[in-house]
Image: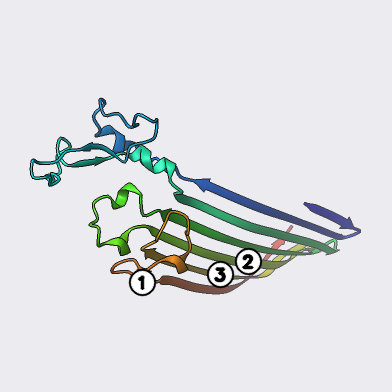
Amino acid sequence: YLSYRLKNFQFRNEVTLCFNKANNSPYGTFDQYTVLNPYWNPYDANGNARYYLENLRYANGQVGNSGDLLTGQIVNPLYNGSLAVVDQNRYKSLMNNLNAIWQAASWLRFNARLSYQQQSDYYDKFLPPTHTDFASLLADEYAKRGSYSRTDGDSRLLDGNFTADVNKTIGKSVFFGTLGMNFQDQKNEATTLEATGFPNERPNRFFNAIQYKSDSKPMGMESKSRLAGYLANLSYAYD
């Protein structure tokens, strides 16, 4: 923050920088645990998280697939906490506000304001191929195991206005007047990529993926807007 005054001139500038980073829990959501039976042990004899809480099979060795919690394979959401899961939101922003006032005369004042804002947003989500989200995939569906999605967004806003104010008394006449203009320039853009098929738990980079996510492609958006306005006001009073 900077403030400066010299005779009839006043200058003020304020700069704000913000950085934020948030990591979502790799252990899943609360509702995943509400449907689990309390007698299932999430850890094996060595204290490691089990992949399956229940793994029931028929006499012929096939896995039950009725969807009932009492049959089939029930995955352990705690297992994902031991993996290199990335689920992260980040942003950084810059805001600068500049104000200037010039009292050119006792009856004439000029005001100017200029504001600039910029923000960059990032979202990353990487699920290793051993994540329980892929437990239902068949062995030959390796190209779908492991996923990575990323969204990058940028926004920019430039906003300003200028006014001149008159308050002049001549004899019994009083004149009031304002002349001003304002402008704004705004731009937003975002890009989203989704890929699947990662050979191991660590390479959370797109170039390590086998393919884009099924039925998806890189997506993006861009928008621009500009405006300008003018104002004028004049009033008169006689006393």
What type is the residue that disc 1 sits on? Lys
Image coords of residue 6 (percent x, y): 90, 58
Q: In this view of the protein, can residue 90 be seen by the observer?
A: yes
Question: Is residue 51 placed above or below 162 in the rendered structure?
Answer: above
Colouring used for the render: rainbow
Q: Secondary structure at mark 2?
A: strand
- Callout 1: 10 Å neighbours few (<14), some, many (20+)? few
**Quadrant in the picture for residue 139:** bottom left
Left or right placement of residue 171 versus residue 141 in this view: right
Image coords of residue 230 (percent x, y): 61, 73
Q: Secondary structure at mark 1?
A: loop
C-alpha distance separating marks 2 and 3? 8 Å
Image coords of residue 206 (percent x, y): 45, 66
**Quadrant in the picture for residue 187:** bottom right
Residue identified by numbered label 1? 217
C-alpha distance separating marks 2 and 1? 35 Å
Residue identified by numbered label 3? 186
Q: In this view of the protein, can residue 178 be seen by the observer?
A: no
Image coords of residue 10 (percent x, y): 83, 58
**Quadrant in the picture for residue 70:** top left
Labels 1 and 3: the sequence-earlier one: 3
Q: Nearer the viewer, residue 153 or 100?
A: 153
Question: Is residue 223 placed above or below 56 in the rendered structure?
Answer: below
Question: Is residue 11 placed above or below 39 in the rendered structure?
Answer: below
Residue 159: image tag: 2
What type is the residue that disc 2 sits on? Asp
What type is the residue that disc 3 sits on? Gln
